[in-house]
Amino acid sequence: MVCLVALGGGILAGVALYRMKRASNAALFSRLPAADAVVVSIDFRALRKAGVLGVLGSSGMVQEPEYRAFVDQTRFDYLSDLDAALVSFHPHGTYLLLRGKFDWKKLREYTVRQGGRCDNTLCRVAGSAPDRKISYFPLYPNVMAAAVSRNESAATELQAGRSGPGFAMPEDPVWSFIPIRAIRNGEQVPAGTRAFARALEGADAVLLSVAPEGGEIVLKMDASCRSVGDARAVVAELRDTTARLRDLIAREHQTPNASDLSGVLAAGAFDAKDTHALGRWPIERSFLESLAGGAR
């Protein structure tokens, strides 16, 4: 009986901790300006355990003297100290909620050395361009609220909560929620993917996620549509776009290369389920390595 009580208590405690974590993530999301914004979530701790961050460790960015100096002076290296990130790419700027291990004293000292200033807990410093003013403050001891915007105090917009996510937040280590208005804005669509973005214009919103699946990494898509017919039309357009890409590669007397974006997109498979258009793209480790190498 004692064992059963202990087991039951352990299960309840585990459920409570799980709900607390999910509520915490949803609470953080509610602070982001998410309307008309692309929101990205990255679980760096999970990626670190999966060995994915080891690929990025050889990238040019982390080898640059400026970044190494930043690490030395702040004692913060995202490869080892950043646990999670929620980022909103909003028309008014980029807003970030970063969970990790921060030496706030070292960060403030670094900011001042870079010509910035800190008033109480809010720090401000100029970015690489006049419209890229950086501001940040400790929302919690292990959470940084930051912003890059024309407004030098934009990070303060993350102090209060807004409405929570209007969708089920994935448990996958990397995911992105993309409203259709952002897809129709060509500036927010990466080069090489615009034909696929046009195919998605019949949807209301798109949820992308990346996670290990078996022995591979998979990019999954869930595009919510207004009707079953719209979902089927989106799937048909995506299949047609993928077929045209495969034909183009064949006309060049080549085969899809899993190490580049065209090879990843050419491997897409799609299906419709009720009012949702679903997609799946396998991602080879060589593609991640090519991304890291491209940053050198």
Image (cartoon, grey):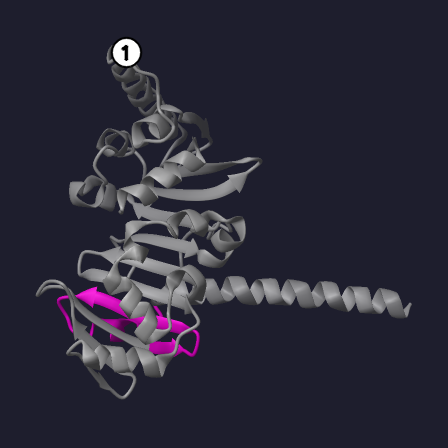
Q: Nearer the viewer, residue 288 or 170?
A: 288
Q: Seen in the image, is 45 located left or right of residue 67?
A: right
Q: Position of residue 179 (x, y in %)?
A: 29, 46
Q: Amino acid at mark 1?
A: His
Q: Label 1, on which residue?
A: 253
Q: Quadrant of residue 31?
A: bottom left
In reply to whether residue 152 is colored magenta, the answer given is yes
Does residue 216 appear in this view? Answer: yes
* Residue 272 spot, x, y in % from top left: 44, 28
Q: Residue at x 25, y 55 (%)?
A: 89
Q: Residue furthest right?
A: 1
Q: Secondary structure at mark 1?
A: loop
Residue 286 at x, y percent in the picture: 40, 35
- Using the image as rendered, state which of residue 230 and residue 140 is in the foreground: 140
Q: How many marks?
A: 1
Residue 240, quarter of picture: top left
Residue at 71% x, 66% y: name it: 12
From the viewer's perspective, tell me whether residue 11 is left or right of residue 101.
right
Which segment is the magenta one? 138-162
At which x and y percent is residue 178? 31, 46
Residue displayed at 24% across by 53% down: 36
Say whether residue 88 is left or right of residue 278: left
> Residue lying farthest left?
130
